[in-house]
Amino acid sequence: MRHILSSFLALHWAAVFALLAFICIDGNRGVATALGVLGVPVQNTRFADLENAVVVAPLAVALLVVAVLFCWAFVEALTSDAANPDPADSVVRIAFISASGVLSLIVIGGAAQGINGLFMVVAVQLAALLASYVAMLAERRSAVAAAAPGTGEIRAAAHVMAKAAAHNSSLARISGRLDSRDDR
């Protein structure tokens, strides 16, 4: 079974973080523009340190790593087996933890720079990440539940096996063959 919602959400977050990484590497106002895309209006007159390569390079690399993790989660969502969802679950979990970590570092760095309004924007992004994670987890759990046999199916299989054993026992008694367990 293909995980349509999981693959869509993984691809969405991969594109979001890849675009943020691409915007960050812009030489003029990369980080300020990326924060603007997130929803934080940043004026370039107050924050000259945001254009420094010491700030831009690690942030862009961190965003790119998260984008790659979500791409990996996308591939796992397309190729994973419903009977064994553990590898895909671990990749998805690592991607969401990394994304939350990067967003938390953005809040810490923004607070150190004195950027106003960053906490609420990142809180909304973290809430969206959490909602996506819960949706992906629910879809995977429902696929596992659908792949596992239900109690009705197990009961029906046990009934069929019991009927077959009774039938074989009756045939053995009618034909006069003794069961190997009776000789003991």
Image: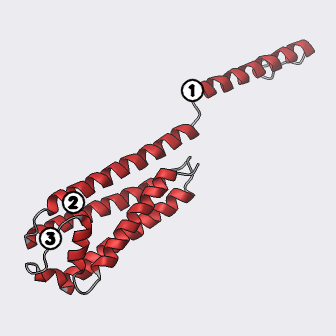
Q: Residue at x 43, y 43 (%)?
A: 138
Residue 101 sits in which quadrant?
Answer: bottom left
CA distance separating discs 2 and 1: 45 Å
Q: Secondary structure at mark 1?
A: helix
Please give the residue where the numbered disc 3 appears in the rendered image.
109
Q: Earlier in the sequence, mark 2 or mark 1?
A: 2
Say which amino acid is labelled 2: Val
CA distance separating discs 3 and 1: 53 Å
Say which amino acid is labelled 1: Thr
Residue 115 in the image: x percent, y percent? 11, 69
Please give the residue where the numbered disc 1 appears in the rendered image.
151
Please give the residue where the numbered disc 2 appears in the rendered image.
122
Residue 15 sits in which quadrant?
Answer: bottom left
CA distance separating discs 2 and 3: 12 Å
Label 1 neighbour load within 10 Å: few <14, some 14-19, many 20+? few
Q: Secondary structure at mark 2?
A: helix
Q: Secondary structure at mark 3?
A: helix
Q: Residue at x 27, y 51 (%)?
A: 127
Counting labels gives 3
